[in-house]
Amino acid sequence: MDPEDWRRAGAALAVALDPQGNGARVQWDNPLSRSKGSFVQAGKPYPSDAVVCRPFLADLTLKSGDHALAGSACVDKSGVWTVLSSRPRKKN
């Protein structure tokens, strides 16, 4: 992902994983790179080292191809989500 892809994806990830959110799938795209994807919550928030974390599922279409991922991310006190881990998963 290029920096603009990640900026757009990161914003979608933050909305999708918001503990106050409704659990809906959140999509993003970058018309310049033609990359796109979506994130959805895959479980309840949980505390970890004084931050809130949450599992997620992602479907991405990048220059390198289509990717289905499962992962987890945590939000710091400033509201920035950081992906802790991700791994390939079978696409539904």
Image (cartoon, rainbow, N blue to C red):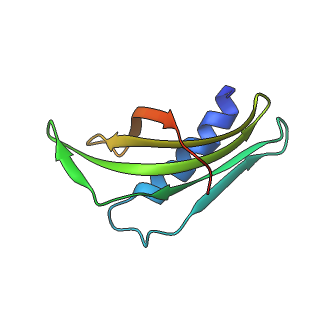
Along the line of sight, the residue nearer the viewer: 15 or 92 = 92
Instruction: Count numbered badges in the picture.
Output: 0
The residue shown at (40%, 35%) is: 82
Q: Could you say where residue 57 lies in the image, as x and y percent from the top left? A: 50, 51
Q: Could you say where residue 12 lies in the image, as x and y percent from the top left? A: 56, 52
The residue shown at (73%, 49%) is: 29
The image quadrant of residue 49 is top left
Q: Is 30 drawn above or below residue 64 in the view shown?
A: below
Q: Is 23 drawn above or below residue 27 in the view shown?
A: below
Residue at the far left in the pictured view? 50
State which quarter of the image contains the C terminus: bottom right
The image quadrant of residue 51 is top left
The residue shown at (41%, 56%) is: 17
The residue shown at (44%, 68%) is: 23
Q: Could you say where residue 1 lies in the image, as x and y percent from the top left? A: 67, 28
Along the line of sight, the residue nearer the viewer: 7 or 19 = 19
Q: Is 58 drawn above or below residue 19 in the view shown?
A: above
